[in-house]
Each structure stands twice: as C-alpha cells, then as structure tokens.
Amino acid sequence: DKGVKLCCSLDPFNPSFIVFRHTLVNFIVPLAFTTPHLKATTKHNSIASKPLRLKETSTRLLLQTIHSLEEVFIQLERQTTDKVQFEAMSCGGKMVGMIGVGTLLALSTIASTSAEITDVGGLRRKRLADSNQMAPRRQLSKSTMDEELASRFFLPASSNRQSSRSDKNDVKTSKKEDPLDIDMRTLMEQMNFDMSMSIMTPQPTPFPTLKPTEQSNAPSFSTAPTVTDCENPGTCENRLRDQIFQVSVRVGTVDALDDPASPQSLASEWILEECDNDPPIDPCTETQIILNEQRYALAVMYFSLGGDNWNYGAIGSGEGEWMSPLNYCEWGPTIQTQGGGSYEMLECDEFGNVLNLNMQSNNMEGTIPPEIGVLVYMTSYISFFNAQTGPIPTSLGLILPLQTFDVESNNMDGDLFKPEFYGLQEIVNFRASLNNFRGTIPTEIGQWTKLQNLWFAQNFITGTLPTEIGNCVDMGAFLFYENEIQGTLPTELGNMNALTWIDMEDNQIVGTIPEEFYSNLDLEEVIFKNNTLAGTISDSVGNLPRLATFWASFNEFSGTIPTTFGNLANLEELELQNNRLEGAIPIEFGSMESIEFLSMESNELTGTIPSELFSPSLGALRILYLNDNRLTGVIPNNYGQLPRIKDLWLSDNLLTGTLPIIAEGEFLFLEELLLNNNDLTGSVDESLCLIRNNTVPGGQLGVFHADCQPSADGGAPQIQCSCCTACFE
C-alpha cells in the first residue's frame, strides 16, 4: 500500500518523495507499470474496474526532479550528516516502503557507489560494501554532474546503459545489467505522458529554496510537505478504493469486491462516482473518512436488501430517498404510523454518525451485509416484518454501543448467539422471533447484564437454559416459545426481579417450577403451556399481585388448585387444562373480579361446581371451561347471572338434576352451551330456546349440545330438547 501511495498519491513536494527520486525512477515507477501486483487487474483496483494511474502531480515531480537534480545535489552537500534508510520488499503481492528521513547527503552517491544489489522479493535493495562503515562520498563537480545526469536520464536507452556501465566499473568490475534500470524518457513516452505539462510551484518553507541555474529553466521547489491534491479525481478515487479495501478487510468481504454484481462492487462504483460531484466527496480529511465508510456501508445495505423495491427510501421515491448526493443523514423519510405516531427511518448524531436505522415493514429482501459492522456508532437496528434472509453477520459484534437489535418476522437463519456478539454489553433489546435461527443459548448470555428484552420465539434453538440467565437482573420480557429447549428451569430465574413477562410455550422443559421463581413479584404474564412440567403449583402464586396471565396447560401438573389464586385481583386469564389436577374447584375463584378466561378442562377435578363461579361480581368472565372432569351434583341455579359469558362448557362430567330456568335478560351474549355426556334429566325450558340465534328477536346461542338423542333400544332420551343444535345419547 505504501508503494502505491508513493508512486500515485504522495504530495509532489513531500521530502520522502524528493529524497528518494533515485528509488522512484529506478524502482517504484517501473514496478508500478511492470509488476503484476500493481497493474489494473490487481484485486484491490478491480473494485471499480478503473486503471490505477499516476497523478499528473507525480509526473511533474519526476520531471522537475530531473531538471533540477544538479541544484539538489549542490544543496545536499551543505546538509548535516545522518542516515538515510530505504527498505522495499514484496509481501503477499504488495509493496511496502519504509522510509526513515535523515541526511540527504549519502543519497547523492547511491547512483554510483554500491557494493552489491540484492534481490528481495522482486525489488532491489542497495547496500554499501561495508555495512559497518559509511562509504566515502564522491565529490562531483558541476560539469561531471551535468554529463552524468544527461547520460543517465536524457540520452537514449542504449547510450544510457553504456555510460552507466562504465561508471560502475569504478566500484565493481563485474555486474549484470539491471532489468529495472529503465530510461525515464522512454518510460514516459511509452506511458504517453505530456512532456510539456506545467510544473507546480510549491509554497515557501523554512528550508532554503533552491534557485535555478543558468543551465536549468525549471522552477524552484522546496522539500517541505504540502497537502495532497485531494480534489484531483484520480487521487479521490484511489483513496476511496483504499478505504473501501480496508473496510472489506475488517468485515471480511474482500472476495466480494471481485464480483462486479455484488452489493459491495455496486456500492463501490456508486461512491467512486461521487469524486466527480460538485463539490466532490472528501477522501482526505480524517473525520470525513469515517463518514465515507458509513456512507459506503449504507450503500451496500441498499443493494444487498433490494433497495429499489423498498416501501420507503427507494431511489426515485421522493423525499428521503437513499443514494442521493445529499448528506446520508437526510436519507430516509419520516414515516407515519397507523396509530398517529411517527419515526425516522435513519437518524444521525451531531457528528454525522449513523445512530438509528428503523426499516420495519419496508419490503426488504436479501441478507444483512457484513458492512453493517462499519456503523460502529449505531445504537438501534430495527427491521422486523420484512423478508431478510441469511445469518446475522458476525461483524454486528463490532457495534459496541448497540442497544436494540430487532429482526423479528423475517426468514433469517444460522446461529443466533455467535461468540462475536458476546461483547455487546450495552445490548438492551435483542429480538429475533419468527425466523429460522439455530444454536444454543450460551452461558455468556450472562454478560448481557443490561438486557431487558430477549425474544427468540418460533425458531429452532436447542439445549438448556443456562444458570447464567439469572445474571440478567434487568430482564423484563423473556420470550422463547416454540423452540426445542430441554432440561429444567434454573432456580436462578428467581434473580430476575424485573421480569414481567416470560413465555416458554411449546418446548421440552421438564421438572418442576422452582419455588424461587415466585419471588419475581413484578410478574404479569407467565406461560408454561405445552411442556412436560410436573409437580404442584405452589401456593406462592398468590403472592404475585400484578399477575394477569397464568397459562400452565398441557403439562403434567398434579395436586390441587391453589386457593390463593383468589388473591389475584388482576388475574385475567387462567389456563390449567390438560393436566392431572384433582380435588375441588376453589370457591375463592369467586373473588377474581378481573378474570375473563378460566379453563380447567381435562383434569381430574371432583366435587360440585361452586355457585361463586357464577357471581355477578365476575362481570368480565366470558369463557368458562369445566368439561372433561369428574364433577358431580347439580348445575347452580344462578348459572345465568354471568352478564358477559360467551362459552359455557360443562360437558363430560357426572352432573345430575334438571337444567335450571334462566330469567329474561340473562345469557344475552351466550354463544356456546355444552351440557352433553352428563346425567341430566328433564326438559330444556323454553327460556333457553328463546336465546337461540334462529329465533326472533332471539339471542346469540348458536351451539347447544345436550343428551337428547333417543337410546339405541328405542328408549326415551335423557333430556327433551326442541332447540338443541346437536343431540347425544
């Protein structure tokens, strides 16, 4: 890289460039156009499919150096002594120039005083005969210098080589012709350089300015450095190429630069064209380089995620479109939500760094490119409800300030918890539900101590819950339903005192609910549904004052139903069905004034149905499932007093007696009444038939099952019913 910069990008008056004019003329310039590593086909240069060319200023410098070489040498004789070192090597197909600037005096003798030339990786290194001693300098007269300069650089190649050989015989009697000893005039003619181009005049510096002699018409120049001409499109493009290459090395997409159809190549072409903008992109200012990298990363994301088909921000979409010449902080519109709110698609901080990307529901298709890791100041990436595919790039781990990562409801896959992500210790929200992610939950999850929301439901995560999950003491919502999690619930769940919502439905968890779990007093939603949990439900459940949802259905819980459920004034949904619960229904259920959904079906409950379940105080209750148990006794006379009841299932029990009459105004919202497979007798009262949905004015009852089917031997049915929708024997 340094070699490329020396011959293509260095300031024309940089001291390193001037001092080593011999190296430039004899080594670097020829190599720039003869070695395969620096041709236009080089991997690094192919990102834009444009030739790597010398700047005009570099050519001017070579001409000026040749014309003024006599005065340079005279001035060099006056300088103090030190040491000049030059090393050049070929490393993996790249040149690396390491230059130590010191005394320029010894350089004047390099062209003629050399003990040996050693080939190092295809480049030439000149060393003195005695590495421990400084070689004596030749005293060159003005006439001798003129003759030597003319013969070396301005005579035809054959004469030049003859002169060079005769001179070098003074030092070494036998030496092979140097294949890199190229005549500069011939070289420049081959490169179609304009020999008449003007020469830049430098700014004055503290060093003495060399005056032209009578024999030279070249302007004077100084050895002080000046700023590289970054407005030159050639310099701009070369610097941007170098920056893009360095970005690709960091995020692992160097190979993609060879594919002209890749998002990386498309983004490279686009950003290189900005060198021709008015004003052009700035590739030189250090702070701007960081912003250029982010601009490039956003462009890669656009091409990688099907930007032309986005709902918001697509090219041609109007205000806020991406890829415009504007500051990228102006990309992305303000989006209005259905609820009357709004959000910004792209937000920057005060320094122009990308802070937030919110691309939810934006019709994005494709993979999140590794260049997302360039956005190292980003705190939030939200892209749920899209069609993103592929894995989460490991480069996400480079974004250390990241607080929110939300890719729910996409088609992504690969490992969800990669080691590269463990260092994201600022993460607060990590949402990846409804994808195809795999892998296990690592113990390092305990390092995310600021985590508040961990959602990875409906994926293919396996393994067990690590005990280190208890370190996430700020966790508010832990959702991992519909995965393949096995093992038991760690007692450390009791450390998560900020936990309000935990959902582990549809996994393979076994064992019991740890008693420590009930110490999370802020719990509002607890879902254990459809696992293989066993044991009893602790009476401590009644100590959760904010509990609104408790689903423990489809497990293997046994024992009696805790009466302490009656303490839960905020409980709205209680699912206990499909377990092995036994005993009576607690009369304390009559105190759950907020209950809306109460299901105890398919257990082994016994005893009678308490009349407290039909108290008008349970005015919110809409669903009551008591079917498929061993309940006995009669149906309470007040069963019609639940003002909002919609479904009442009492089937498949051992109930006896007759069906109570309902009063006018009761069961106004009843849709399903299941009484079949019991031992009820008598006739269905006309009051129930009047609430059928096929009568006038009628009601809502559309499903009415009873044991009204005559027996197989022709006997009378258990119940006489003229308005039932289905009769059972």
Image: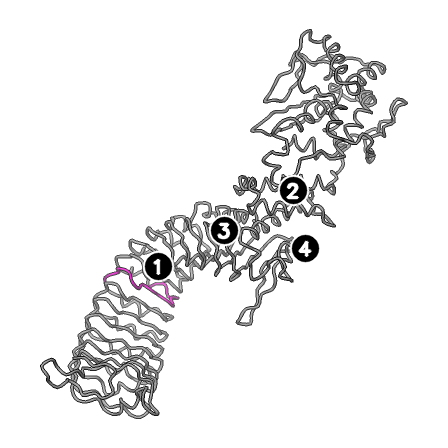
Q: Looking at the picture, which amino acid does disc 3 mark? A: Thr
Question: How many numbered circles are shown?
Answer: 4
Q: Secondary structure at mark 4?
A: loop
Separation of disc 3 and disc 1 at Cα? 24 Å
Residue 18: tell me if it is visible. yes
Name the kind of residue labelled 4 in the image.
Answer: Leu
Q: Foreground: 238 or 21?
A: 238
Q: Which sits earlier in the primary sequence, circle 3 or circle 1?
A: 3
The residue labelled by disc 4 is 326
Left or right? Give the position of 325 relative to 212: left
**In the image, residue 138 above or below residue 88:** above
1 or 2: tag closer to the N-terminus: 2
Note whether 515 is above or below 366 in the view shown: below
Label 1, on which residue?
482
The N terminus is located in which quarter? top right
Work out whether mark 3 precedes mark 4 in sequence or the reverse, and give the earlier one. 4
